[in-house]
Image (cartoon, grey):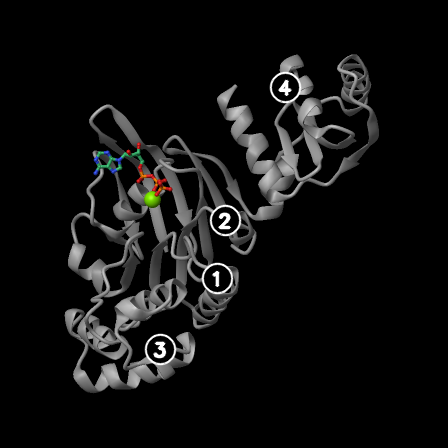
Amino acid sequence: MIEVRNIRKRFGGVEAVSSLSFAVKGGEIFGIVGPDGAGKSTLLRLMAGILLPDDGGIEIAGVNVRRNPFIIKENLAYMPQRFGLYEDLTVEENIRFFGRLFNVPYREISARMVRLYEFSRLEPFKDRLAGKLSGGMKQKLGLACCLVHSPGLILLDEPTNGVDPVSRREFWKILYDLLGEGVTIVVSTAYLDEAERCNRVALMYNGAFAALGTPSEIKSSVKKTMLEIEAADVWNAEAALRRAGGFGAVIREGAMLRVFAADAAGAERRIRALLKKARVPLRAISRREPTLENCFVEIMEEEKA
Ligand SMILES: Nc1ncnc2c1ncn2[C@@H]1O[C@H](COP(=O)(O)OP(=O)(O)OP(=O)(O)O)[C@@H](O)[C@H]1O
Ligand SMILES: [Mg+2]
């Protein structure tokens, strides 16, 4: 569906996207995860044809984005990180406005609206001003506006950022419904639980992909073992291990510490010795299956090294 070949985009001295190549399959939900400034928005803008790459090219369904921007736009929806709803128009007026913007005939907009209301459950609020909606509802309306021309591909830039957990779940339910209709979705997110829901995920860091695959492929690509440590004083335990160095990522999760190590048995012995020296009583130490989030932290740690 999407073929990205060696694209690069610089802003002054910053390489926001550095020589990236990958493909998105038709009918999949492809996630882009990464910290602030990783280049997620820049990549999505390049894919939407809003920004031109310095190098390389993108094809969507066999059509070159740079050469045929208008063909591309007919079948594509792009929801930017800050979507421009008209706050002084109602929910319904916003949908109609975007419908006209995409040249959707009036009667078709009305028919489409029924479906969009079904998806978004915004019908009870159709006469409410967009400016008076909750954050989650605004994002759902933004998505509804993007979908008014029935695109086959949607690009969403952190659509659930700052949205409460219940609304986030609802939003993802909509995405799965769309997927069921054969729509292809590319979504960026800072939430790891959302990354886990994608068919494939790219971990973006410094303009490049540090990892790419299904969530379980990414987990099994991390060859180190994760140890979970329960110590009397988690702060001092963490400080002692960080000071000593020589481990992979050291992650604090509530009252527990999680540490990646290439040689689990050796690391366990070292941890016992280091904590003893720091006078931090060790309560338990055990091997644990890392979460996707733990793996991302470890992969980024390896990138930094
Ligand atoms: N129009 C621009 N002009 C100059 N620099 C830019 C521009 N857009 C992005 N950048 C820089 O490119 C890098 C990547 O930015 P980008 O917005 O793509 O990251 P992001 O992953 O979307 O971050 P966030 O999670 O904060 O939205 C950053 O260093 C940013 O400052
Ligand atoms: Mg962004």
Q: Position of residue 211 (x, y in %)?
A: 51, 37
List the residue tagged with mark 2: 191
Choose top left, top right, bottom left or bottom right for residue 73. Answer: bottom left
Instruction: Tell me: residue 166, above or below residue 240.
Output: below
C-alpha separation, residue under disc 4 versus residue under disc 3: 51 Å
Instruction: Tell me if the residue at label 2 has its CB under 8 Å from ligand 1.
Output: no
C-alpha separation, residue under disc 2 versus residue under disc 4: 26 Å
List the residue tagged with mark 3: 116
List the residue tagged with mark 1: 168
Kind of residue indicated by mark 4: Arg
| Dot placed on the residue nearer the N-terminal end, 2 or 1 | 1
Choose top left, top right, bottom left or bottom right for residue 90. Answer: bottom left
C-alpha separation, residue under disc 4 versus residue under disc 1: 35 Å
Q: Circles 2 and 1: CB distance less than 8 Å?
A: yes
> Dot 4: within a 10 Å radius of its alpha carbon, few (fewer than 14), some, or many (20 or more) residues?
some
Residue placed at 40% from the left, 74% from the top?
120
